[in-house]
Amino acid sequence: MLLADLILELRELLVDPRANFEVIIDRLAAHDDLAEYEVARQYVVPAIEGLIRERLDDPDPQVRVQAIVAVRQCFSRSAAAKLLRHLVKDANLSVRGAAREAVSSLGFDEVALPNADFNPRHQRWNLGGWYFGTGDWRRPGLAPQAVRAALPSLPDVAALASWLNIDDPAELRRFMRPGSDTGSPYIDFEIPKAKGGVRVISAPRAPLRAIQRKIYAELLAAIANHDAAHGFIAGRSTVSNAAPHVGARLVLKTDIREFFPTVHYWRVRGLFRWLGLGSVAGELAALCTRRPVVERNGQRMVVWPGVLPQGAPTSPAIANLVCRRLDARLQGLAERLDARYTRYADDLTFSFHGSDGGGEPGVAVGRVFWWIDQILQQEGFAEHAGKRQVLRPGGRQLVTGIVVNERQSVPRPVRRRFRAILHNCKRDGLASQAHGRDDFADYLRGFAAYVQMVQPQLGQRWVAEVEALLAGR
């Protein structure tokens, strides 16, 4: 086929690229031996790039596999590398295999450094973090005896059911059903994100929520987290997360991509095995993860393996414990760089305070981010490189919503907005600012208490003003 014929054929298909997506990719693959193939690729990519990126994040593994094939056909080598890095360690076996095949055909290696703990035949993919504790061939060691001794004895599934106050062990399967339809232990709903888009919350229904709360209170809460972790831990908060970075001459921030979905069933099972609960580790992992259901060719398909649901009381604690080694390695990196490190859920922060001579410390920013990416890859996570931030004293240094330039403070625009609300409430009454919200009083009390955590003097004054307002309504 001549290039002109291929372009004419693609032109008709690109009238509706979403409906013709698979056909477009098939036509490109069938003619990638053309000398002028690069012209055809450049012609197609502007129309389908958005679709490819959308499909790479689709919950259906088969759709992600198709998108990986499209990446291989449509993107340059460097652009394909950025899109395929995290998929090499996808939780789904078919997606992982397709990504590795694409990476191999494109001729580049995994970004993470080789891991000498593993057989050389695995070195190309560096299985050190992703597979640690996820299979019989590579089990983690056990937690210290003092940790295991504080946990309940659960020698078999019957003991687990009894501990959970369930009469019949077979009833446990009822709490492991996939999806969120009637009969499922989860219900899904959406909440808006602060910067646009929506976040899907999978909240357990009351019976499963009670089970998960027991697992959290009597198994997970007893295990110490790393000192650098501050999210969802009793006695720690956004304030404690921001405190080490006050007065820094340089702050580096980045995010972990798809934090909860990255922690899947196999990793959770490995955690419970580490706790000495190997005989019921699979059941505990299934009770703490959720398998979504997707529509494929008119049929409902269950996605495997399950992942941590956003909304379950066990998810934050499990994610923090799975990140123990990640936090230890990033803390070690920070110490070598004479920096400070904290993590709040998926938010990573490094700060450099420099020498007594003043000025910005001599930090190779790109090199630091490179090492962060290295460690994340080795530990089975992927960095969200688009959220990297470099914050200097000349601008506002914001860490988990708190300004840390000279001292901890709530951002000025936020303070001004709340001060205006209080002023208007005093002048025109609470209803003028509530706009029909039934929880407006709780909002006023909650925000004033938050400010008191960050800026005690200002917050104490606002707490008194709020109570006076509410007492006089």
Image (cartoon, rainbow, N blue to C red):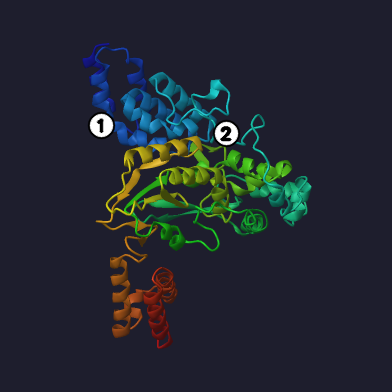
Q: Are marks 1 and 2 in contact (CB under 8 Å)?
A: no
Q: Nearer the viewer, residue 217 or 25?
A: 217
Residue 185 x/y as whole percent: 60, 52
Q: Quadrant of residue 120?
A: top right
Q: Is residue 438 left or right of residue 215?
A: left
In the picture, the quarter occupied by the C terminus is: bottom left
User: Mark 1 sits on what residue?
Assistant: 46
- Compared with 181, 116 (above or below) is above
Residue that appears at 42% across and 30% down: 111
Q: Which mark is residue 131?
A: 2
Q: Residue at x 55, y 46 (%)?
A: 324
Percent from the top left, x then y, of residue 362?
Answer: 31, 44
Find the distance from the CA under tag 1 to the CA under tag 2: 37 Å
Kind of element beneath mark 1: helix
Residue 224 seen in this snapshot: yes
x 66%, y 58%: residue: 214
- Regarding residue 16, the answer to whether it shows in the image is no
Q: Say whether residue 460 is left or right of residue 143.
A: left
Which amino acid lies under the numbered mark 1 shown in the image of this protein? Pro
Which disc number belongs to residue 235? none
Horizontal and vertical percent for residue 328?
Answer: 52, 45
Front position among marks 1 and 2: 2
State the residue in front, 429 or 453. Answer: 453
Type of the residue with mark 2:
Tyr
Q: Position of residue 190 (x, y in %)?
A: 44, 54
- Check disc 2: other Cα within 10 Å, few if <14, some if 14-19, many if 20+: some
Of the 4 image quadrants, the one containing the N terminus is top left
